[in-house]
Structure formats: C-alpha cells, structure tokens
Amino acid sequence: MVRILATPRSQHGNPYCRLLYDEMERQGCVVDEYRVERLLAGDYDIWHLHWPEGFFQDYAAAQAAGRIVTFVVLLVWAWCSGTRVVWTLHNLEAHENRHPVLEDVFWRVFPRLVHATISLSEQATCLAVEKMPALRQKPSVVIPHGHYRPVYPRTMTPTEARERLGFEPHHRVGLYFGSIREYKNVPALLRSFRSVRGPDRRLLVVGNPHTNNLRDRVQEEADQDPRATAVLRFVPEEAVQQYFLAADLAVVPQREFLNSGSALLALSFDRPVLAARQGSMIDVQEHVGTEWVRLFENKLTAHTLGKALKWADQPRPNEAPLDDLSWVHLARRTRRFFQRL
C-alpha cells in the first residue's frame, strides 16, 4: 500500500487530480489532501506536487518570499523523514510571473529538492531537462493526461445544444473553453476571428476571467463582432456539455504552453482541436491522429482559424481514440512508479 500526500487532492474547476486519486484509492493506495501537520508527521511514502507555483504566485512579494522559504524547509523535511517528493510537470514556471527575482531563485532550488518527476508527454520531459538540468539524473516517467469522459454528463444531442445557444444548423462554430488568463490570448483570438470571412462563422468564448480588467477586454472584443459570443462565468460540470456539443471546433489559442487540459476535454466530447505546435499537443496529435488535432506554427491568425473551421467539417470517426487514456490505466502506471520509488 502506497501512502500519498497530494498537493492538491482535488481542484476546483479541474477534475484531473480527483480522477487520478479516486482511481488510485480504488487500486489500494491511501491519498490524503496536503496539510503541513500531515507532512511533518512523516507518515507518507510520497508527497505528490502538481503546481508548486501555487504556494506563492498569488501573494505580494514579501509574503511570497516567506512562503517560498517555508516551502523549501518543508521539502528538506520531507527528504529527512524519508518521504519521496514527486513533481508532475504541468508547468515549468508560473504563468503570471509577478515576482521575477523570487521565482528565478525558486526554480533554481526546487528541482534539486524533488526525488522524481512525472511528465504528461515526451516533449515536456525534453523541455524540463533542458530548462532545469538538475532533473537530468532524477527518475522520471511519461504518463499522459487522461480523458474526461467519466466526468461530464452527455444527456443532450448536438442539435439540442445548438438550439439552446441560438446557433443555426449551417453555422460553423469555434469554441474557446476554459479559464481566461492573460497568457491564454483570448482577446487576440477574438481579434483574429473578426477577420475570418463568412457570415456563417461563429466564435463562442466560455470561461471565467482571472481579473475584472481582462473580463472587460474580452467582452469589448466580443462586442465588436456580432458573430462572436462571450459567456464570462464559471460553468458547472452539468452545463459543460452544451458548449462542446454545440461546437464544430475547439480552439487553444495560446502560443506557449506545456499541457492543455482543455484540448483533452474537447476530445472527450469528440470535438476536433486547433492548437499551437507546443508541448504535449505534439504527442496528443500523434496519439489521436491528424484528423482530430490540427497544429499551427507561431501565432494564431485569421487565415489559420478560417482554414481550421473548414477542416473541422471533414468526415472523421464518431469518437476520438482515447481508450489508452483511461484513468484506470494511468492510475496503475502512477502507482507502479511510486512503488518503484
């Protein structure tokens, strides 16, 4: 039996951790949510970290510095108590770099204090080792991102979903779905869409903006094109289906990223994806095929978006091939890796 302290055990708005750990518990592991007192008790085999930047990135400089020092002390404690520290590489830096000097120090120290890493793709492994040479000698394994088919209800038809959102059968609908943060390039997506030709083209932007300023900018861009619609709020799990089932194409507009849960969510609803040739999307395209994932170079342009909306109309199988990305399979691989450690 492997005892795991998870940071986090579950996450609001993203079921990745919950799906992984629920299945690991069904396979005999013990998984508890991170608490300082639990770590200090030394009763765990593995301290599994997903987004270490979450310890400090949303705090003012002085508080962030204190939290980084505390975090490093806790990592040293884990080493001394025999708890293995494992980092899943969702990101290689904080998306909003609010404290450049502090973060530079943190990312120099942190990789030295982990015992092992899990990457979601081969590309992520290569990028991590290049950026953080201290990881080169650490045990590592590639365990891809799982699909989301067990999570979200699918109780309506695409026709019903389109009718609810006011789309006609002849409309070709592109969808951005997910949290809206600066690095996601959502205002730029809307600006590019304005130059896409065709009265039947539509763009649907759905997500909760990180700041009020960003909310205003996204709404302002959407208001400049009657073919664009912005739904700027958090969407509960039971309502997610209507947006994906109404769409012909899911768009991941950011130019630089390591992994994309939004792309896996789209494929879970059997919707083709347009994304940058970055990080895990290269591996995802190899896994599911070019009929399901289309990759663009550099930045997203109106020409690229227009061609992708036309590409999305091409015939393809009814379901994306995601059986190898089941959580039963991925949890088993994770458990075996932890047992090796």
Image: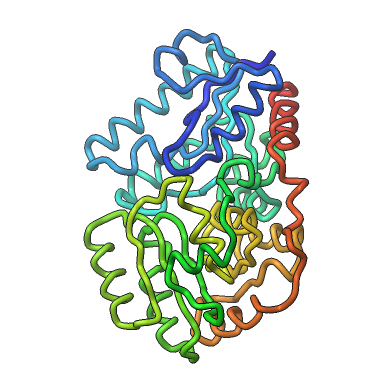
Task: Specify the quadrant of the image occupied by residue 326.
Answer: top right
The residue shown at (68%, 62%) is 282
90 to 291, vertically: above or below: above
304 to 289, vertically: above or below: below
Residue 163 seen anywhere in this rendered image of the structure: yes
* Viewer-nearest residue: 90 or 309: 309
Residue 259 seen anywhere in this rendered image of the structure: no
The residue shown at (36%, 72%) is 187
Which corner quadrant holds the C terminus? top right
Task: Specify the quadrant of the image occupied by residue 178.
Answer: bottom left
The residue shown at (57%, 20%) is 31
Left or right: residue 299 compared with residue 290 = left
The number of callouts visible is: 0
Please provide percent x and percent y for residue 293.
67, 67
* Viewer-nearest residue: 175 or 32: 175
Left or right: residue 10 compared with residue 54 = right
61 to 332, vertically: above or below: below
Left or right: residue 338 compared with residue 154 = right
* Viewer-nearest residue: 275 or 87: 275
Left or right: residue 287 compared with residue 114 = right
The residue shown at (46%, 51%) is 239
Please provide percent x and percent y for residue 173.
52, 74
Which corner quadrant holds the N terminus? top right
Please provide percent x and percent y for residue 210.
31, 54
Please provide percent x and percent y for residue 57.
34, 43
How are the colours assigned in the image? rainbow
